[in-house]
Amino acid sequence: MATEVVEVEGHIIDSLILAKILDTIVDAGADYRIVDVQIGRASTDTSRARIEMVGDDDVLTTLVSRLQLHGANRVVDVDATLQACDRDGVLPEGFYSTTNLATEVRVHGRWIEVENPEMDCAVVVDNVGGVDGGHARTTPMHRVRRGDHVVVGLDGVRVQPLERPRGANPFEFMASEVSSEKPKEVLVAEVADRIRGCKDAGGKLLAVCGPAVIHTGAGPDVARLVRKGWVDVLFAGNGFAAHDIESNVLGTSLGVLLREGRPVEHGHSNHLRVINEIRRRGSIAAAVDDGYLTGGVMYECVTHDVPFVLGGSVRDDGPLPDVYTDVVEAADAMRALVPGVSVSVMLASTLHAIATGNLLPAGVETFVVDINQAVVTKLADRGSHQALGIVTDVGLFAGLLADSLCP
């Protein structure tokens, strides 16, 4: 039997981090002993626990990796192991796979903060022999280049736990199973307050939108949020943009009149016709410039210089000329806009919400709004531990949010 010792520090008691760590150890089939614990006395004090684990070598190796998701790190004073890539786009065997939590690596006896925390990446250390000991950054697999020094194994890596806000918190229920039986007005007001706080602190708001935003009639509300300066970045797909343009040019979404709720004859082709007209002009911005598009979310993004990324998929019609048809290029374009984002609101989107969640650091407050309960829990299941779910109709939510932020 092998032995490993891990340590975790922070508000680990009231955030239930310690309980989650112990449950994870037991579920893995290992034994544990708390060899040292220091509990903070005041609400602002942190606590620290050191835990000794006993189990099979393979079990402990996997367990140490899983415990890092909760901010528990091995108690070792050794440098990270670095290995150079021998090919572009290929990582060394045994590379350290990142979480989206704040991470540090130990190089030449110094702990270095890893820039741009992002899950499922490698850690590349630049200027390894420099006076400052180098600097570290997350790098997706396709971006590494031959000669890059990549962290291999778990030694010399530590992460910080994600902690929920302390004190009374309307989102407390989200630590357990997401429920639809919650007062939506209270939650919307709290989301609005979080957005105001983040913006007042100089942060950016990222909106991630699915086509249902338009289908439910919430397009004008999201457009209002863009127009009033609340939305700083927009991520969506071809469907959202196409139906947003369709609704503003022809008054329909999927061929259904939004004001009357009835389908129009041959309306199923309406989105194709507007896509065709945008393609004729060469871009959404060109369609705004020549007066073809005079309203809607995409119109407001163009006229107010709000950057957007439209990531394509194999099922897209057209697509619109602004759509990234290469998914790797789309992800890189999204990465370029993530710095500075402090809060994200994901509205009725599954694929783009998950794609965005894969890129966001854990410190970005993330609110996932969908009528389907499975959607709002999926991000947390996939590693976006900061995601908080609100089960409701996105049309109602967007309207309440816009009314709160844009009185």
Image (cartoon, rainbow, N blue to C red):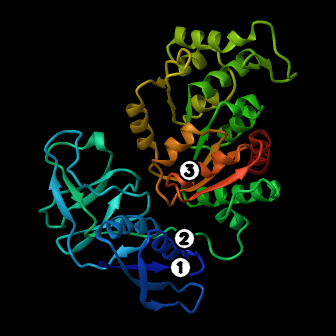
Q: Quadrant of residue 394?
A: top right
**Along the polypeptide, which appears first: circle 3 or circle 2?**
2
Q: Give the amino acid at mark 2.
A: Glu
Residue 234 visible in the shown view: no
Picture mark count: 3
- Sequence-wise first label, 1 or 3: 1
Q: Can you say whether 251 is above or below 361 in the image?
A: above
Q: Which residue carries the number 2 mark?
A: 163
Q: Which dot marks residue 225?
A: none
Q: Residue 303: image x %, image y %? A: 60, 29
> Who's the residue at 19% across and 67% down the image?
132
Give the amino acid at mark 1: His
Figure quadrant of the N terminus: bottom left
Which of labels 1 and 3 is toward the front? 3
Residue located at (60% from left, 19% from top)? 288
User: Secondary structure beneath disc 1?
Assistant: loop
- Direction from residue 322 to residue 257 in the image, left or right: right
Residue 99 showing in the rendered view: yes
In the image, residue 225 above or below residue 126: above
- Label 1 Cα neighbours within 10 Å, binned few <14 / some 14-19 / many ≥20: many
Which mark, by number, is residue 11? 1
CA gap, disc 2 to disc 1?
7 Å
Q: Secondary structure at mark 3?
A: helix
Point out which mark residue 379 bears: 3
Label 2 element class: loop
Residues at badges 2 and 1 in contact (C-beta under 8 Å)?
yes
> How far is the residue under mark 1 from the one under mark 3?
23 Å
| Picture residue at 11% right of the left edge, 62% below the top | 129
* Earlier sequence position, callout 2 versus callout 1: 1
228 to 39, vertically: above or below: above
Cα–Cα gap, marks 3 and 2:
17 Å
